[in-house]
Image: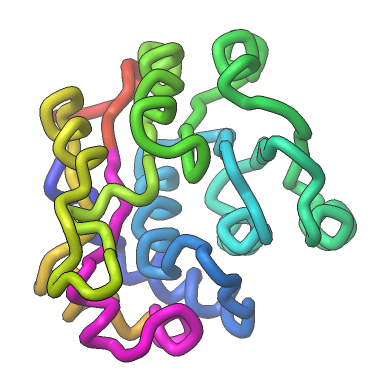
Amino acid sequence: MQYCLMAPDELEMIFLRQTYGVPHQHGGMLPSELLVFGSLCWIQEVDVIYESGRRFGYSTEVLSRFSVTKDIYSWDLTEQPRDKWLEKNCPNVILGIGDSTKYVGQDMVSISGRVALLIDGPKGPPAFEMFDKCKDEVVVCAIHDLSRRSEKKGVSGGQENMSRTTAEKRFNGCYLEGEDFVARYGYLDESAWRRDYNSREDMTRYGFSLGIFPGGKWRGA
């Protein structure tokens, strides 16, 4: 699965053109992560992205503009501040309100086509349980906040992220991180590190945090 760390050059150009000017939202996924996840959806011929946890809708909007799938089903526990804007401006987005962990199993059966699961809430073990419920029905699952170190103020380099440790023991997959990845795609994340981090060094210290895991519908080795 190492090739999942790269995006084809032509898709990178499309991503830049289609998502240029979309302002990063606090706490949202990084543009580099969305480029690679979206490109993987295109490579795997995914029809639908099922997103759990949208908050301010940054990932929802970016993936909608990237247009690598026909539809995006996006869930959150409560109505979010940008929901009305998303409904008006992102016609391929279908918003849901409620606990996605309760619906994901039946939704995967009812959705037509190849599905990718993107989890940015719940976090940790509940996210792993959510993937387990439907892993045979999805092409791929991406889970956010799985960097090796989790930030704790006053502790150099952060502390061990137990969710990452658990994920490595539980699933086979890859993680968007490391010096090579930062060198190749870090330029996309300028707006994110300016908003959410004190410096570029601060961002790269804690790393990129998207874990990508193949599901039962994955094609290829």
Give the tally of numbered discs: 0
The N terminus sits in image quarter:
top left
Quarter of the figure with residue 187? bottom left
Whether residue 204 is in magenta: the answer is: yes
Percent of width and height locating residue 186: 28, 79
**Residue appearing at x 14%, y 29% in the figure:** 221
Percent of width and height locating residue 189: 39, 79
Whether residue 181 is in magenta: the answer is: no
Percent of width and height locating residue 92: 74, 47
| Chief secondary structure of the magenta portion | helix
Q: Nearer the viewer, residue 46 or 121?
A: 121
For this orientation, the residue located farthest to the front is 154
Quarter of the figure with residue 131? top left
Display colour scheme? rainbow
Q: Nearer the viewer, residue 182 or 196?
A: 196
**Residue appearing at x 28%, y 64% in the figure:** 151
94 shown above or below 178 = above
Percent of width and height locating residue 5: 21, 56
88 shown above or below 22 = above
**Residue appearing at x 77%, y 52% in the figure:** 80
**Residue appearing at x 81%, y 45% in the figure:** 79
37 shown above or below 30 = above
Quarter of the figure with residue 32? bottom left
On screen, residue 44 versus residue 50, left or right, reads: left
The magenta span reads 189-212
On screen, residue 122 versus residue 4, left or right, reads: right
